[in-house]
Image: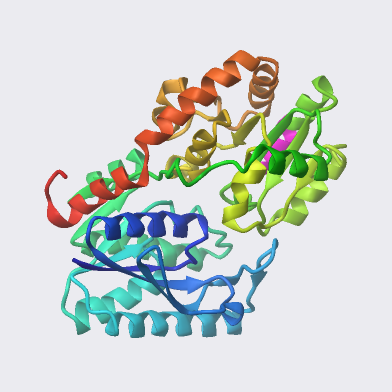
Amino acid sequence: MQITFLIIMGIERPSGRRYFAIARELVRRGHRVRILALHPDLPSCPQCRFVQDGVEIWYVGQMHARKAASVPGRFGAIDLLRVLISATLGMIWGIICSPADVYHLGKPQPVNGLAALLAVRLLRRQPFYVDCDDDEVHGNRLPAAWQRAVFGFWQWLLPRMAAGTTVNTRHLASILTDAGVAPLALVPNGVNPDDFLAPPAATLAALRTALSLDGRPVVAYAGTLALQNHPVDLLIEAFVQVADALPTAALLIIGGGEDLPLLCDLAVRRGLRDRVYFTGQLPYHAVPAYLALADLSVDPVRDDPVARARSPLKLFESMALGVPVITGDVGDRAELLDGGASGVLVRPDDSTALAEAIRDLLHDLPRRQALAAAGRERARIYRWDRLAARWATIYIRETP
């Protein structure tokens, strides 16, 4: 089949990695796949059309924010309207230039949703599919009620108009099933363990020395620094308690985002100036090297719609590297971590419980080693090739 994805982010953004990984595996299964995407910083994009691992990538417009540096740049109201119109027209043009058997929207949002209604349903008179991997209303920073209403409308409408819907969590599957949306395919996030590897020991040692981490226990967070959906402040508050018990421990925060300045300020105010290290935004291929420096990683969460709707890439990537992970027991996380056999589950939204789990695991090398081994094995269950086979069932309606 010829399959075209319509996604509203770049392929290296967290959700973008989901769609590129699925697309790559679909290509390996014999399909032809093109991704129509929005670039995080279109003026700096060196090539708007290219092929990567057999997948055609077309950048047809600019994302809603300019995400070229560690702290994204926001557009003013007029410029944002221009960007959204241009992105929607670019997506429509891309659809017109991309005859396909299947059109699959990555996220039910306004830009790709409107493009699908106009170009796929009206012009091509074909059905489309939708992937829901988040709570779009609560997972995005939408300060105005009208913005939340717009996103809520598209999140409600598109799965009901789709020929089929993929979801990444049981929480979203339950919501859509209760609403009568069918057919559904549950496809969590995943990782290719053979691709997500630590660098050679000499490289790790040099990086550890450069970051002044020699001989220190290291706790890591790898992900977006946006408090709307990633409560890294909860981890910093927990680490205050860890630092009191373990004076040499360091917290390595890998990634950038709109709340990076706020989190840097919080670390200073909580007396952690020389204990918390912020890498800023890194290329995705550099993340394994930094994450592999850690004795454990943390996915801090609150018990809210955002966490329940998430299948965190960071869990799979940490397990694949053999870095034990601690997270809150929310949504599908207990299932992903095999009931706690492949990671540590704590009460969500509880900095004290998180701090206790971090301290206990840092003091228990045999348990860290056991969790690392179990995590590596668990990660293989969530290989992208297996997940792509499950994804394809929404098109062919048969078990692979």
Q: Is residue 1 above or below residue 77?
A: above
Does residue 87 show up magenta in the picture?
Answer: no
Dominant SS of magenta comes to: helix
Residue 108 visible to the viewer? yes
Quarter of the C terminus within the rendering: top left
Left or right side of 385 for 39: right
Tell me which colouring the rendered structure shows. Answer: rainbow
Q: What stretch is highlighted in magenta?
A: 232-238
Q: Determine the image quadrant of residue 244.
A: top right
Which residue shows up at 88% across the image and 37% down it? 271
**Residue 77 rendering spot, x and y as whole percentages:** 60, 79
Say above or below: 242 vs 393.
above
Occupied quadrant, residue 142: bottom right
Q: Is residue 204 above or below residue 324?
A: below
Q: Where is residue 285 in the image (x, y as percent from the top left)?
A: 57, 54
Task: Name the residue nearer the viewer: 372 or 43.
Answer: 372
